[in-house]
Image (cartoon, rainbow, N blue to C red):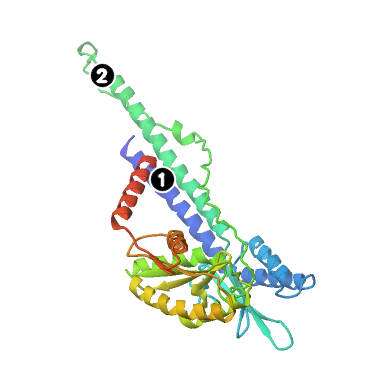
Amino acid sequence: MTNKVVVIFSILIIFIFALGIFYFAINVSDDMQRGSSEADAQFRSFLADMNYEISNSPYLSPDYLEKLRDLIKQNEYIAAVTIKSENNTYFAYPLSSKYISASSASPEISVTSPALIVRSTGIPYNDTTETEVQAAIYLIKPSKIFDYALYSFYIIAGGTLLALLVLLLSRKRAPKQAKSAAVTEENIIPAKNSVSEPVISEHEKAKIKRTPVDPIQQKDAVKTIDPMGLFSPATGISWESYLETRLDAELVRAASSEQEFSIINIKVENLPHNHPCAKEIASILIDTFNFRDLLFEFSDDSYICVLPNVDLNKTLSVSESLYQQLKQVISSFNLVNQLIFGISTRAMRLVSGIRLVKESIEAVNKALEEPELPIVAFRVNAERYKQFLTEELEKANKEHVAY
């Protein structure tokens, strides 16, 4: 190709790339500008659906909250919803959402992204209680952003394929030109060479056939149905279904701050959570640790206490004092159920919440085998943990697929 053709083609490719980026930016910006009115419309529609469900089920009843979760799942614009009064939180979904700030007092909608807006309204619960419905609403649906990004990718990919096609055609054309220009001494004549360079125009008229690239399939989030409210009505502490999410979040925070982290697995053998004694035990745990959202029901007869920034020695000290208090409570109900404490700590490791829970269960099982040791701590074997990391790394390397 001549220099002039190269320059023109380069400008064309740059224009195609800029067109792809401009298409994405202008569409997202336009939808964002019109998103406020759309968000208000979606919120009004959501409230209308809520009022319709109230006519079928009592407000804030378990059946009503179950239907409310379905409404949220079906509405692509709704990111998170809370229902609360001045003294209590009745509903927060999805609890694992980054737009719900979990606290011991009252979870609230917290939005910093310019792509979302918060809307709220009041709905009377009874004659004396007014509830506030808060919703985080997308100004533009995530699926629309994905579509715009996908179409923009197609435009840019088309420009890239066009550039590659032209490059390949140019490389194939070059040897043919060199061959036609070759002459022998017998063909040399003292005449002026008037052969002009041929102009390549076929590729400019050719249509490039592209097959759409399948978008990357995002892994579906595990859909779980949250229990009614944030806390169990039997004990007043958090449901077990929230344990893993909260543990992982606290472990990330502890690792980033290089802090210790401990959990206590308290088992009162064969004492269900709906027993009056279990209610008293939960009350003592709340008084001791202050934060209900760091206390969880576990299994049928156990409780897990989450202790951020607390090392093993401090955890053992707290456990010994707490053991005596709970032992007295159990005796006051004329019960002889075995009381066991299983402790596990982060020990400056990068571990998951599930692993800490499993370690605490091992400690509990050890205590069950030795009744004279009601408090057992899982001590980390540094060499075994190092060997475990090495084996995991080797396993990952073997399974690694190079692209």
Quarter of the figure that contains the N terminus: top left
Instruction: Report how many numbered discs are placed on residues in the image.
Output: 2
Mark 2 nearby-residue class (10 Å; few <14, some 14–19, many ≥20): few
Q: Position of residue 48 (x, y in %)?
A: 73, 71
Instruction: Give the residue type at disc 2.
Output: Ala
Q: Nearer the viewer, mark 1 or mark 2?
A: 1
Rendered image quadrant of residue 188: top left
Left or right: residue 364 versus residue 144 is left
Q: Which residue is mark 2?
A: 182
Q: Which residue is mark 1?
A: 13
Residue farthest right in this picture: 55
Secondary structure beneath label 2: loop
Q: Is 211 rendered above or below residue 253?
A: above
Which residue appears at 72% of the width and 70% of the height? 64
Q: Position of residue 247 (x, y in %)?
A: 46, 66
Mark 1 nearby-residue class (10 Å; few <14, some 14–19, many ≥20): some
Give the CA distance from mark 1 to mark 2.
34 Å
Task: For residue 368, say whether it is visible.
Answer: yes
Secondary structure beneath label 1: helix
Q: Position of residue 103 (x, y in %)?
A: 50, 77
Mark 1 or mark 2, earlier in chain: 1
Left or right: residue 308 versus residue 111 is left
Rendered image quadrant of residue 342: bottom left
Task: For residue 199, say whether it is visible.
Answer: no
Q: Position of residue 246 (x, y in %)?
A: 48, 67
Q: Is 22 rendered above or below residue 295?
A: above
Instruction: Give the residue type at disc 1.
Output: Ile
Q: Are marks 1 and 2 in contact (CB under 8 Å)?
A: no
Frontmost residue, 158 versus 102: 102
